[in-house]
Image (cartoon, rainbow, N blue to C red):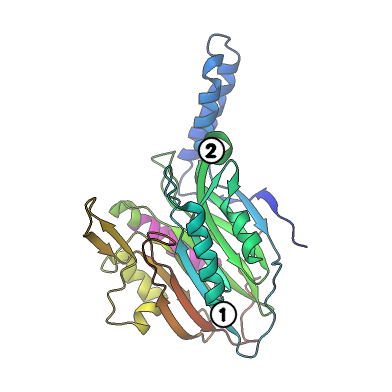
Amino acid sequence: MSVLNERYIKVEYPNTSSLNFHRKLKVLGKRTLRSSVLQRVQPFAQRISAVTEPSGRISIMDDPENYRGRTSDQHVVILTANLWHDWPRRRRFRERLECFVELVQKEAVDILLLQELARIKDFKTDQWLADQLGMAYVYSRANGHAREIGFEEGLAVFSRFPITKPRLAQLSDHKNPFVRRIALGTSIEVYGENLLAFTVHLGINGRQNESQFCRLINWVEEQSGSAPAVIGGDFNARENTSQIRNAQNSWQDSFREFNPDDDGFTHEIQWPWGGTLTRSRLDYLFLRKGNIPWRVDEARHIEIDDYSVSDHTPVLIKAVIPTGRLQSSSENDPPQ
């Protein structure tokens, strides 16, 4: 039986300003405790300190309960989805999660790359999904803090195959210590071989998004070496931006290859009185083949009605990884 563990892992940072801010805040909180006059602000100081806590704490369950062994066709179904925490309103939250579980089961998904997984004091989306799907997974908080303020949201990779060696990168420059943009990755043992999987959620500011995307590409390439990888998430960048064009030059955009004339929209903003304000393609699922001849048999968006799952459209690919030809990524894994 697989066991859920929590631990800290090393995180790569563009700079140390966020770490220094958090440390100074903790020191200030300790000094406040010594002052009887200021002790009343202790809970508030603890909450601020918790929200500014840098990323690095992960929850991980290495082995799936429903392990997918070898099959004759060796297909791997991969899906990326932003689950839309919708905090603080959290409209139809449990109902949308139940619809998502049905979607995953219907599509026979093997690997999930998820964003905006919510945790509150009495409910952890990551653990609930693992119980419902019987998958292995790794989760990392991105923003908020469930214990201190009653809410946080983060990234996760779920798999019907065993996972190993999680890794985490900080992509934002941390001028704002209360907001983090991160990428979470892990190795997945697919049919006894290693595949790298990355999930990411980038910022909405154009210049910041571009710099975060540049860091993401460099980090993924550094982590992957010659190994194959999948990179999925809410990139918050339209298809005509330079960062998406660069990604398409570096990695395989299977959806666009299979659907050259499709508008590809995955996110829509509506006017308060109804009708569409903007529609954009923001969610992508890229393949980095490495030295492996991937074959993608299917690539599409999962159409959903009335936000039954999220305000973003999930992206799915069905690929074949040749058994016995995957390059082991152990040589490329960073030291733990």
Look at discs 2 and 1 and give the one toward the viewer. 2
Residue at the image position 50 percent from the left and 81 percent from the top: 318
Q: Is residue 221 magenta?
A: yes
Q: Secondary structure at mark 2?
A: loop
Q: Amino acid at mark 1?
A: Val
Compare marks 2 and 1 and give the one earlier in the sequence.
Answer: 1
Task: Give the camera-side residue of 199 and 245.
Answer: 199
Q: What residue did someone put label 2 on?
A: 150
Q: Is residue 142 magenta?
A: no
Q: In the rendered view of the protein, which quadrant contains the N terminus?
A: bottom right
Q: Which residues are magenta?
A: 210-228
Q: What residue did someone put label 1 on?
A: 76
Q: Main secondary structure of the magenta part?
A: helix
x, y percent for residue 212? 39, 56
How far apart marks 2 and 1 lie (CA) works out to: 36 Å
Tell me if residue 108 comes above or below residue 117 in the rendering: below
Evaluate whether residue 190 shows in this view. yes
Q: Residue furthest bottom?
A: 72
Disc 1 crowd rating (10 Å Cα; few below 14, some 14-19, many 20+) is: some
x, y percent for residue 141? 54, 48
Left or right relative to 227: residue 131: right
Residue at the image position 49 percent from the left and 31 percent from the top: 48
Q: Amino acid at mark 2?
A: Gly
Tell me if residue 331 comes above or below residue 41 in the rendering: below
Task: Give the camera-side residue of 235 and 332.
Answer: 235
Evaluate whether residue 115 shows in this view. no
x, y percent for residue 252? 41, 78
Residue at the image position 30 percent from the left and 82 percent from the top: 260
Q: Secondary structure at mark 1?
A: strand
Residue at the image position 60 percent from the left and 51 percent from the top: 10
- The answer to which image quadrant residue 163 occupies is bottom right
